[in-house]
Amino acid sequence: MSEVEPIQFSPRLRAGAAITAAAVPDYLDSTIYFDRRELAEILRVYGRRVAAGEWRDYALDFGRDKAVFSVFRRTSEVPLYRIEKCSKLGRRQGAFSVVAATGLILKRGHDLKRVLAVLERDIRLAAV
C-alpha cells in the first residue's frame, strides 16, 4: 500500500444486524399480502357461501404488486370472483376490489367489509 492510495473504511455490522438481514429473504420485503384481519373477513364471507353450497374451493396468490383471493365453484374451473388487494391504488380508488370472472370490477374501495358486501347480497324472490 502506498501513501497515495486512500484508505477506505467500511462500517462494521453488528452480529444481530447481519443475522436479521440474512434471515429475511429479499422476495418477502416487497410482497403484498392479506393481514390477519383482512383474511378473517374474506373467510367469513367464503364460509357462508360454502355452507350454502355455492362455492367449493379457493386459491391465494401473493405478488409484488397485488394479493389475490380467488373463489371457485369447482376446482377445475376459472375463478368466479377475485378479491384483490393492490397497494398502489390504496390512496386513490381503494386498495380492495372484487372482480367477476369476466374481468368486470364489481366494487372497489378502502374498506374491505364494504367491498365484500357485494358478495353477500342475496337474491330474494317476490311473492305474487
Image: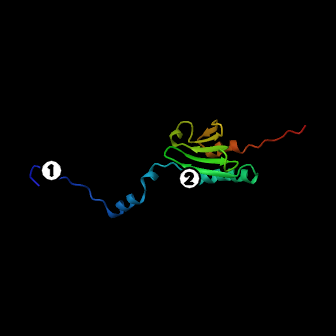
Dot 1 or dot 2: first in sequence order is 1
Q: Which mark is residue 6?
A: 1
**In the drawing, does residue 26 fall left or right of residue 78?**
left
* Cα–Cα span, label 1 and label 2: 50 Å
Q: How is the image coloured?
A: rainbow
x and y percentages locating residue 10 in the rendered image: 24, 55
x and y percentages locating residue 101 in the rendered image: 66, 40
Compared with residue 27, is residue 115 higher up or lower down, i.e. above or below? Answer: above
Name the residue type under label 2: Asp
**In the drawing, does residue 121 fall left or right of residue 30?**
right
Q: Residue furthest left?
A: 3
**In the drawing, does residue 118 fall left or right of residue 39?**
right
Q: Quadrant of residue 19?
A: bottom left
Kindly check if marks 1 and 2 are in contact, taking CB atoms under 8 A apart as contact: no
Q: Which mark is residue 35?
A: 2
Residue drawn 9% across the image and 53% down it: 2
Count numbered badges in the picture.
2
Q: Which mark is residue 52?
A: none
Name the residue type under label 1: Pro
On-image quarter of the N terminus:
bottom left
Crowding near the residue tagged with mark 2, few <14, some 14–19, many ≥20 C-alpha atoms within 10 Å: few
x and y percentages locating residue 52 in the rendered image: 76, 51
Residue drawn 85% across the image and 38% down it: 126
Of 111 and 58, which appears nearest the observer?
Answer: 58
On-image quarter of the C terminus:
top right
